Amino acid sequence: MGIDWYSLFFYVLAAAACGFALAVVLSGNIVRMAFHLVMSLGAVAGLFFLAGADFVGALQLMIYVGGTLVLLVFGVMLTARGPFVSMQTSPGQWVLVGIVGAALLAVLLQAALSVGRWAEHGEVAAAPVAETRSTSGAIGMGLLGVRVDRLDTDRTNPASSDGMSGYLLPFEVISVHLVVVLVGAAYLARARRRIGSPNQPAAPVRALNGTPNP
Amino acid sequence: MQPIGLEHYLVVGAVLFVCGVVCMAAKRNAVGVLMGIELVLNGANLNFVAFGSEYLRPGGPYSIGLDGQLIALFVIVLAAAEAAVALAIALAFYNAHATIDVDQANELKR
């Protein structure tokens, strides 16, 4: 019996995702937290590939690891000065947070491990890992409103054709939402000249403006 | 050893979710809180993809098919938008208060 590569890759990637997520929580240094988050999100992208969601995995790598984390690292670099690089949480708060986290993990694990009993026949079928096909075409058609994966649904019966709905309207809404959000973020984060309040240092504003503040 | 099934993915998603919640609750750095939000969204995303995967539960009564991947895509895009706005807010807060500690953001209490 050869090595079950699917299970091996799953366990390696799952251990990486969970381990680096724990490292994000336990690390006190904000720069190391960003690095651990990158590794954890990359491992999750690998899990997406293993689950057959190749397009989502690729987008996870491109948008999350390539885009969102670059944003986060820029936020770290613009704000990490002196005492803010590693801010410690008090031990009492850690105890409270540990209790809450353990309780939540117990509830979620109980729900996750009992998912097999949701069905009448709760056996997990053996995964046919040999046959793979790309999902990007089906996802693109789904975003345009055509569900190529549910073509056998009886469309004359309105009760059973609920699953045929595509995602054209959410696609448009999220496009406009993204434009509005990015313009708003650029407006919020612009460098502005502060007026008054002489008791607070104005050094960051001056540095962002690039022009000397008189 | 049983084959990799839906439960394995749900356990990983649960661990990511709890790590994110703990990170959101415990970190004092605003950027650290943002990282916790990213972890929470990733745990939810992993569950969506696992429920929609045809390899983990082929033909099962709870297979949501391509819906899981489409919702995961929407979540990824919304997470990017949320990160942009939240970082802009964090930078504005840092510019105004010269600190990034979320415990210092208590002006509405006074």
Image (spheres, rainbow, N blue to C red):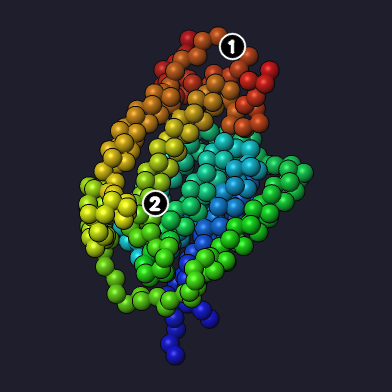
Which label number is shown at residue B72? 2
Query: Among all residues in the image, which is located at the extreme bottom?
Result: A1
Callout 1 environment at 10 Å: few (<14), some (14 to 19), or many (20+)?
few
Subunit that carries the residue with mark 2: B
Res A66 seen here: no
At label 2, the amino acid type is Ala
Whether discs 2 and 1 lie on one chain: the answer is no
Q: Which of these two is toward me, B10 or B76?
A: B10
Q: Which of these two is toward me, A117 or A109?
A: A117
Residue at 58 percent of width and 19 percent of height:
A201
Q: Which of these two is toward me, A63 or B97?
A: A63
Q: Which residue is mark 1?
A: A197
Percent position (x, y) of residue A88?
68, 42
Q: Which of these two is toward me, B3 or A122?
A: A122
Could you tell me how many numbered marks the image carries? 2
At label 1, the amino acid type is Ser
Percent position (x, y) of residue A187?
39, 23
Give the quarter of the image for residue A137: bottom left
Residue at 26 percent of width and 68 percent of height:
A133
Subunit that carries the residue with mark 1: A
Give the quarter of the image for residue A177: top left
